[in-house]
Image (tube, rainbow, N blue to C red):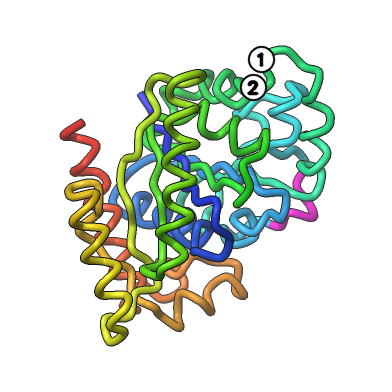
């Protein structure tokens, strides 16, 4: 049975897509069968997985509108070692087209149920806003991984996200929980980041992952080559951190 996780944060620019593609690549490297679902119309996770969003024959848009199954629309990224259910600008239209559809927030969940036995992990890259697309992701998932920078405003955004997850849990998806908070773009030389990190650990305790992803140039360069950092430069500090995070995720899931 596949474990389905949303990588979500209502604040933009916190490294959601970087986290999604590198965790997918890290899990694939340690022998897990992974499907990466891009729910952002910008299609950055698709491009960052070595798949050209401009030439997608079928995308997550077709899956949400039930004109294609996940098995038909997902492509294997051979360079990265995981399957990609890609997105492009078509997806922006799905919001409008789903407005009058019954059970519209459960479309992705129904589609993923058909490939439950084919994957160990399904990772969903959510857009930064709380939209019908994000809601589809949250309704499908067993849990949420929250990448966050250790900065003051990030704590405010986290409060909003926790409230959203509580509402979805209460009304739409009883399985949904926060799996953990991942500290990303971390620079231990900055005192404020260290203080916020300590606050997170004090407040959320074991919900904070042990792995910390450092600020790393090679991770930032990798998307311009259409690859996750873990594949682009496996020896980089950031890539090594994501490999460690993948191992930590597997261990955490075994305890659930």
Q: Which residues are magenta?
A: 52-56
- Does the magenta run of residues contain 107? no
Q: Residue at x 44, y 58 (%)?
A: 19
Q: Nearer the viewer, residue 153 or 100?
A: 153
Label 2 SS: helix
Task: Give the answer, above or below, for where 235 lies relative to 147.
Answer: below
In the image: residue 131, left or right of residue 90: left
Q: Which mark is residue 103?
A: 1
- Asked whether 78 or 198 is in front, the reply is 198
Q: Do the residues under discs 2 and 1 have CB atoms within 8 angstroms?
A: yes
Magenta-highlighted stretch: main secondary structure? helix
- Inspect this view and state whether residue 235 appears: no
Residue for point 50% across, 51% down: 9
Tell me how far mark 2 sits from mark 1, CA to CA.
Answer: 7 Å
x and y percentages locating residue 157 in the rendered image: 48, 55
> Which mark is drawn over residue 107?
2
Total labels drawn = 2
- Image point (60%, 38%), residue name: 134
Q: Examine the image and state in which quarter residue 132 appears.
A: top right
């Amino acid at each position: 049975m596949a474990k389905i996780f949303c990588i979500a944060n209502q604040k933009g620019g916190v490294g959601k897509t970087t986290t999604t593609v590198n965790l997918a690549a890290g899990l694939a490297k340690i022998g897990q069968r992974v499907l990466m679902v891009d729910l952002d119309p910008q299609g950055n996770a698709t491009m960052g997985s070595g798949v050209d969003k401009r030439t997608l024959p079928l995308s997550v848009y077709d899956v949400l509108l039930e004109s294609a199954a996940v098995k038909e629309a997902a492509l294997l990224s051979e360079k990265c070692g995981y399957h990609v259910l890609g997105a492009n600008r078509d997806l922006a239209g799905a919001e409008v087209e789903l407005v009058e559809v019954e059970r519209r927030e459960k479309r992705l969940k129904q589609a993923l149920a058909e490939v439950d036995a084919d994957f160990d992990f399904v990772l969903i890259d959510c857009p930064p806003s709380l939209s019908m697309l994000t809601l589809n992701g949250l309704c499908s998932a067993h849990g949420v991984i929250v990448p966050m920078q250790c900065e003051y405003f990030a704590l405010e955004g986290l409060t909003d996200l926790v409230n959203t997850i509580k509402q979805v849990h209460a009304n739409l998806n009883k399985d949904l929980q926060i799996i953990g908070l991942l500290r990303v773009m971390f620079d231990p030389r900055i005192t404020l980041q260290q203080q916020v990190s300590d606050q997170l650990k004090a407040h959320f305790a074991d919900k904070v992952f042990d792995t910390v992803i450092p600020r790393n140039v090679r991770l930032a360069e990798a998307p311009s080559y259409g690859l996750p950092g873990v594949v682009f430069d496996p020896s980089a500090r950031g890539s090594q951190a994501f490999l460690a995070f993948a191992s930590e995720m597997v261990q955490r899931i075994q305890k659930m």
